Amino acid sequence: GDSVTQMEGPVTLSEEAFLTINCTYTATGYPSLFWYVQYPGEGLQLLLKATKADDKGSNKGFEATYRKETTSFHLEKGSVQVSDSAVYFCALKETGANSKLTFGKGITLSVRP
Amino acid sequence: KAGVTQTPRYLIKTRGQQVTLSCSPISGHRSVSWYQQTPGQGLQFLFEYFSETQRNKGNFPGRFSGRQFSNSRSEMNVSTLELGDSALYLCASSLLQGGSDTQYFGPGTRLTVL
């Protein structure tokens, strides 16, 4: 079945540091890929998405490129801020009439001033 | 446009009771999905409704059920509550079903079973 693997956390960075959060996936078809972010006490917010190979999703300084050859969708940001502290989830959705999202375990990011 | 709303935000129940959670999707959205979030299992898909029909179901026991109304609002019900049902229950809505359509999540209902 489908699965998403995220790097182990938590991750602690200083403000303005470079961020990479690894995400790899296993899927039978050609899924769409997503990064969601969850702030304390809140639901999930879509951060970015990519729907086909080589697509790059970007939002709020975050970027991720859909790499079919390595089945990866790593999240990057050049300079993190304290306000980026949250839990980040990588997710996939198979094509077709199915809205089910398969999530990774999530990773907690803490950014120190 | 208002986002996905879920009520109540917090619930405390005791074992053996049943509970009903409500979700109002974004206006115009016809697909509603439910997820359970726990520290141990992470985010797990419960079921999806589209045009009042359950279209997809995750690996949860029959104690978990749901429905969708003609205005796309959805409810989920958990009967005979167990301690392990304590979780954050998230509802998500999307305009269409499937494809690359984005799902938008509500703030969740935090259920505690004592």
Image (cartoon, rainbow, N blue to C red):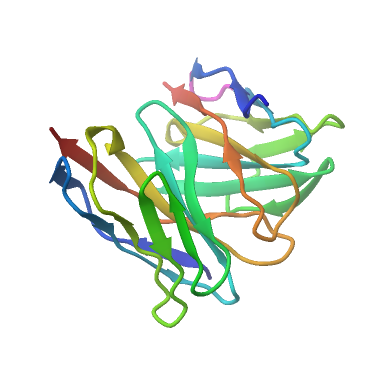
Query: Which image quadrant is residue B77 in?
Result: top right
The location of residue B43, given as percent across then percent down, is: 46, 46
Tell me how many marks there are: 0
Residue depicted at x 74% and y 53% = B97
Residue depicted at x 62% and y 24% = B5
The location of residue B12, given as percent across then percent down, is: 47, 16
Quadrant the C terminus of chain A occupies: top left
Task: Confirm whether residue B40 shows in the render.
Answer: no
Residue depicted at x 35% and y 49% = A106
Query: Which image quadrant is residue B94 in?
Result: top right
**Residue at the bottom extreme?**
A69
Residue nearest the viewer, comparing B87 with A69 = A69
The location of residue A55, given as percent across then percent down, is: 51, 68
Q: Is residue A54 left or right of residue A104?
A: right
Residue nearest the viewer, comparing B47 with B59 = B47
Q: Is residue A36 above or below residue A94?
A: above
Q: Is residue B59 above or below residue A72?
A: above
Query: Main SS of the magenta segment?
Result: loop
**Residue at the right extreme?**
B70
Q: Is residue A71 left or right of residue B100?
A: left
Residue depicted at x 65% and y 24% = B2
The boundaries of the magenta stretch are: B13-17
Q: Is residue B42 left or right of residue B102?
A: left
The location of residue B30, given as percent across then percent down, is: 78, 41
Query: Which image quadrant is residue A38 in?
Result: top left
Q: Is residue B16 magenta?
A: yes
Task: Confirm whether residue A25 shows in the render.
Answer: yes
Residue nearest the viewer, comparing B68 with B24 = B24
